Image (cartoon, rainbow, N blue to C red):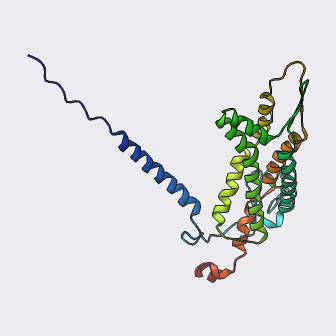
């Protein structure tokens, strides 16, 4: 007597799984886009009292809150000099950023590596390295080099320019999104040294023998300078300057209870 056979479970439909995964990806992407595009009209910025409006400032070293009258004096707790905002933040950021914009052009036009051999002299730029990797079939590596060496520095400089212009014109348009953009610059800044490794990667692609000499070109120095200058510009910028425009609004934007108290 044979035992009854168990019914085999139905095989999952691959098409249904693909549709479900695509729908899940669309929901995640829609959530990210909605968070980035959420404006201050649909979700107004909360009107809350700030330390600056109360005549207070915080120490950048230990976060001790002190009266604004102590600005320029040592912190009572750690001894660091108290500042309401980073000193000369806009001037230093503009100086570093404009220098980075100027050096960005020779960094991409001048050769980062010069190879001298018995066959002649070969000069390689960053873009020529990207083209070489793409034509040789290393598409992923070419994309990494393109993003790390060209797109990321340019993106950082454009974002910082937008933030500086917003502070200059005292704009409060999408101020929360502007703050997120500065956070994006900080995240990208952690990978800025990847650009330096790209130059070493391009140098390693040349298989030269004993009769060849590889020397760094002028583009390598300009490229390293762009990386350092964008990092200094990001560190010099004070994101609290973006929110100072909110404090400068007329008191009519505040709730009536706050106006009555003032």
For the C terminus, the image quarter is bottom right
Q: For the view shown, which residue lies furthest in the top direction?
A: 1
Report whether 22 appears left or right of 210.
left
- Residue 124 locus on image (x, y percent): 83, 37
- Can residue 214 be seen here? The reply is no
Against 225, is 85 above or below? below
Report whether 224 appears left or right of 177.
right
Residue at the image point whose x is 77% and y is 61% from the top: 161
For the N terminus, the image quarter is top left
Residue at the image point whose x is 23% and y is 30% from the top: 8
Q: Foreground: 89 or 16? A: 16
- Can residue 221 be seen here? The reply is yes
Q: Foreground: 175 or 191? A: 191
Residue at the image point whose x is 67% and y is 62% from the top: 178
Q: For the view shown, which residue lies furthest in the left direction?
A: 1
Res. 45 image quadrant = bottom right
């Amino acid at each position: 007597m044979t035992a009854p056979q168990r019914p085999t479970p139905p095989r999952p439909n691959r098409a249904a799984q693909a549709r479900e995964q695509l729908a899940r990806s669309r929901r995640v992407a829609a959530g990210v886009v909605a968070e980035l595009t959420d404006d201050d009209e649909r979700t107004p910025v909360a009107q809350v009292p700030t330390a600056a409006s109360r005549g207070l400032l915080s120490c950048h070293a230990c976060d001790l809150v002190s009266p604004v009258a102590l600005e320029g004096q040592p912190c009572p707790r750690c001894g660091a000099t108290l500042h309401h905002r980073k000193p000369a933040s806009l001037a230093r950021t503009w100086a570093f950023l404009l220098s980075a914009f100027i050096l960005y052009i020779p960094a991409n036009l001048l050769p980062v590596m010069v190879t001298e051999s018995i066959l002649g002299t070969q000069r390689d730029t960053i873009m020529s390295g990207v083209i070489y990797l793409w034509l040789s079939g290393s598409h992923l590596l070419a994309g990494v080099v393109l993003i790390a060496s060209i797109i990321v520095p340019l993106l950082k400089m454009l974002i910082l320019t937008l933030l500086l212009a917003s502070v200059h014109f005292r704009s409060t348009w999408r101020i929360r999104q502007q703050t997120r953009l500065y956070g994006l610059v900080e995240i990208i800044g952690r990978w800025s040294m990847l650009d330096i490794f790209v130059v070493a990667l391009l140098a390693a692609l040349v298989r030269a023998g004993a009769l060849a000499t590889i020397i760094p070109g002028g583009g390598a120095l300009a490229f390293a300078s762009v990386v350092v200058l964008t990092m200094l510009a990001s560190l010099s910028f004070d994101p609290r300057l973006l929110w100072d425009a909110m404090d400068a609004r007329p008191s009519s934007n505040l709730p009536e209870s706050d106006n009555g108290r003032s």
